[in-house]
Image (cartoon, rainbow, N blue to C red):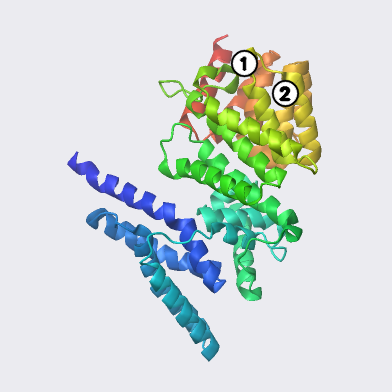
């Protein structure tokens, strides 16, 4: 329809621009050591693209178009800051390389180098993964803050300080030697998984941006695992994402309704992805070294997918895996999942007791899965009034319309009965 064309054109332009974001930030920042400057330059380029492309169409080489605009803005900005002859010579070389690359069929993908720069020991540990999410994958501070259970203002300040640090001390953009990996790899893996998880919350694929994040997360996971096959946690993360992705088609009914894991039709699961994930997990387990968070989370997913063969879920094994996972990564998110597993293994009362231990953690006040789990266990115990209150909290916090409808139906069933 004619009146829809501007919206369709704008959506296509936005998708093309966003798909190039991390690649272009990495390409520019690797040459200037100025992440914030690269982001500012690209912000202008994106604004120009979203103004022009809906009228003219997405160019044949969108990255080259964006790079041309960003180059003019970025080089001018650095020139205003740096006036020495050596700096001017450096800028000239950068400008010449960028201009030459604009004619290439494909830009070199330097996102992995940018990710490890963001995970440098000189950057505060708590901001490394958030910094990767913003610079490489284009998350805004509010979305990152929600994922890491802090306020947007606090997260924004941390990100600004980190980018300034990269520029001021000239952090190198490179994949570190094995002896240097350590906690830097942990931050890279955490960011990749957070990106995948954001895309995973859009199982129907209705939001192009979020669907692309799941695809990008798996792509980056494959890249890291292929570069570091001897790192069991890198391989374990890839296995974890593939297990989850294998269930995508089963997470919604044909009518678009949310289907919880226990009720999913295993015939809709992707056996090829599950088999690949199992092979990766076995390889990671065979590698030397401690078993880490991602291997354990992948093992939990493996235990769930075993239902496709035996028709039942081994909750004893899953609870034991969560016990081990809590010891390795003592996050409230893991503790909530462990409480649910305890409820399936020992009964709702035991699970609720495990949840109540977490009740004083203020980070969970606005965390939907905590309230949904609490509501479900209270309902199983016949505590209808408190279950309804918990469902109300969960419904108010849920972004996904299908999950919100699912929770509303659960709440309605309680009040009807």
Question: Which element carries disc 2, helix, strand or loop?
Answer: helix
Q: Is 308 positioned to the left or the right of 92 in the image?
A: right
Specify the label residue 121 is tagged with. Answer: none
* The quadrant where residue 397 appears: top right
Percent coordinates x, y for residue 200 in the rendering: 53, 36
Q: Does residue 170 lie above or below 11 as drawn?
A: below
- Quarter of the image that includes the C terminus: top right
Circle 2 packing at 10 Å, graded few (<14), some (14-19), many (20+), is: many
Residue 240 visible in the snapshot: yes
Residue where numbered disc 1 is placed: 309
**Residue pointed to by mark 2:** 341
Confirm whether residue 394 shows in the render: no
Earlier-in-chain disc, 2 versus 1: 1
- Binning the other alpha carbons within 10 Å of mark 1 as few (below 14), some (14 to 19) or many (20 upward) gives few
Give whichever of 365, 269 is nearer the camera. 269
Give the camera-side residue of 156 and 325: 325
Q: CA distance from mark 2 to mark 1?
A: 20 Å
């Amino acid at each position: 329809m004619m009146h829809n064309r501007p919206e369709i054109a704008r959506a296509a332009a936005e998708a093309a621009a966003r798909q190039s974001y991390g690649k272009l930030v990495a390409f520019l920042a690797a040459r200037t050591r100025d992440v914030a400057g690269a982001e500012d330059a690209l912000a202008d380029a994106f604004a120009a693209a979203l103004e022009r492309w809906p009228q003219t169409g997405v160019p044949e080489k969108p990255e080259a178009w964006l790079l041309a605009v960003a180059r003019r803005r970025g080089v001018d900005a650095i020139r205003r800051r740096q006036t020495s002859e050596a700096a001017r010579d450096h800028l000239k070389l950068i400008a010449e390389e960028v201009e030459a690359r604009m004619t290439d069929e494909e830009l070199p993908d330097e996102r992995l180098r940018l990710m490890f720069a963001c995970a440098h020991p000189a950057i505060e540990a708590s901001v490394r993964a958030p910094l990767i999410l913003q610079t490489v994958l284009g998350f805004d501070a509010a979305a990152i803050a929600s994922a890491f259970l802090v306020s947007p203002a606090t997260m924004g300040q941390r990100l600004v300080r980190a980018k300034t640090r990269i520029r001021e001390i000239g952090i190198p953009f490179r994949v570190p030697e094995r002896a240097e990996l350590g906690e830097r790899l942990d931050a890279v893996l955490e960011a990749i998984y957070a990106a995948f998880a954001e895309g995973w919350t859009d199982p129907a694929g209705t939001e192009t941006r979020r669907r692309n994040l799941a695809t990008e997360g798996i792509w980056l996971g494959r890249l890291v695992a292929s570069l570091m096959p001897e790192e069991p946690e890198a391989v374990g993360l890839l296995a974890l994402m593939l297990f989850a992705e294998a269930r995508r088609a089963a997470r919604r009914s044909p009518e678009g309704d949310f289907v919880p894991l226990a009720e999913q039709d295993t015939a809709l699961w992707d056996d090829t992805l599950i088999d690949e994930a199992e092979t990766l997990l076995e390889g990671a387990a065979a590698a030397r070294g401690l078993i880490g968070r991602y291997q354990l989370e992948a093992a939990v997913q493996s235990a769930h997918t075993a239902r496709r063969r035996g028709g039942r879920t081994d909750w004893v094994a899953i609870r034991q895996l969560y016990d081990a996972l809590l010891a390795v990564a003592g996050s409230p998110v893991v503790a909530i999942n462990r409480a649910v597993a305890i409820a399936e293994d020992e009964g709702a009362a035991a699970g609720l007791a495990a949840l109540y231990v977490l009740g004083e953690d203020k980070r969970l006040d606005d965390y939907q899965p905590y309230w949904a789990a609490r509501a479900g266990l209270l309902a199983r115990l016949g505590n209808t009034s408190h279950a309804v209150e918990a469902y109300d909290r969960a419904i108010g916090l849920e972004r996904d319309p299908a999950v919100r409808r699912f929770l509303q139906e659960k709440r309605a069933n309680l009040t009807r009965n």
